[in-house]
Amino acid sequence: MPYLTKEKKAAIFAEFGGKAENTGSIEAQVALLTERILHLTQHLKANKKDFSTQRGLMAMVGRRKRLLSYMQKHNLNGYRALIEKLGLRK
């Protein structure tokens, strides 16, 4: 059973993107990446030698970092609100 169902993704997009169809907003993308990163982190705690998943996790962290950097440059108030809402450090 997948950990991210259509309903869960739609809820994330509705909460962070404004509506469920707004999948392209930076806030929604960062929120979805954060959800996936948290899931993979739990997976890697149990499967320490799963290096291909570890590589994918690092790619996701890098993508999220680039999106947050872009958002920080272009919408500082939105950036601060997003990291507060997601509980990210910074």
Image (cartoon, helix red, strand yellow):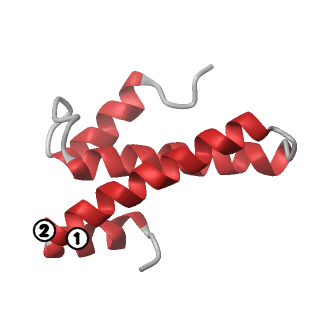
Q: Which residue is mark 1?
A: 72
Q: Quadrant of the C terminus?
A: bottom left
Q: Quadrant of residue 11?
A: top left
Q: Quadrant of residue 18?
A: top left
What numbered label is drawn on residue 75? 2
What numbered label is drawn on residue 57? none
Query: Disc 1, disc 2: CB below 8 Å?
Result: yes
Residue pictured at 17% horizontal, 29% vertical: 21
Closer to the camera in the image, 72 or 29: 72
User: Tag 2: residue type?
Assistant: Asn
Q: Calculate the distance from the C-alpha at mark 1 to the C-alpha at mark 2.
A: 6 Å
Indicate left or right for 13 with 36 as reference: left
User: Element type at marker 2?
Assistant: loop
Residue at the limit of the structure toward the top, as seen here: 1
Residue pictured at 67% horizontal, 51% vertical: 41
Residue pictured at 87% horizontal, 42% vertical: 49
* Location of residue 8 in the rendering, given as x and y in whole percent from the top left corner: 41, 33
Query: Is 10 above or below relative to 34?
Result: above
Query: Is 70 above or below relative to 7?
Result: below
* Location of residue 76 in the rendering, given as x and y in whole percent from the top left corner: 16, 75
* Location of residue 52 in the rendering, given as x and y in whole percent from the top left corner: 72, 34
